Amino acid sequence: MTDDEKAIRKVVETWTAASKAGDTATVLRLMTDDVIFMVPGQQPFGKEAFAAASKGMEGMKMEGTSEIIELQVLGDWAYIRNHIDMTVTPPGGDAVHRSGYTLTLLRKEADGEWRLARDANLLAVQP
């Protein structure tokens, strides 16, 4: 495994751990400034909208796993195909279980760090 592949796997691990801990600041640092997210039923959105939506998730409990199925490094760009299985429980609310695949593009920035640049999230609600 190359150093770049190790660094990208670390981004995924850090993202997952920070999400579980409700650490939005860390998650935002793992994104490029021009990041674009695509999810079913919504227009693509960027970092600012992600941050705003995250504020609305304060107090939620998140559990889950992220498994990298495929990882390819292509110069200063890389892609990963993940399978994510997660459950989010709002304070005093019912748990929502989602699972599915994502296709994520990462870019190696001028500081040498890999950051998420594009993400197509296909998670669906599960019974």
Image (cartoon, rainbow, N blue to C red):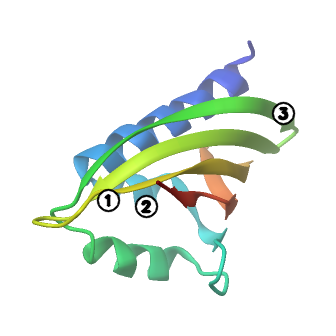
Q: Position of residue 61 (x, y in %)?
A: 22, 52
Q: Residue furthest right?
A: 74
Residue 27 visible here: yes
- Percent position of residue 46, x then y: 58, 78
Answer whether labels 2 and 1 touch (C-beta < 8 Å).
yes
**Residue pictured at 62% horizontal, 84% vertical:** 42
Image quadrant in which the N terminus is located: top right
Asked which secondary structure carries label 3, the reply is: strand
Element on which disc 2 rests: helix
Q: Where residue 33 sits in the image (x, y, percent)? A: 57, 70
Q: Residue furthest left?
A: 92
Q: Secondary structure at mark 1?
A: helix
**Looking at the image, can residue 113 be seen?**
no
Q: Amino acid at mark 2?
A: Leu
Task: Give the residue number, with chain letter if any, for mark 1.
Answer: 25
Q: Amino acid at mark 3?
A: Gln
Numbered mark located on residue 28 in the image: 2
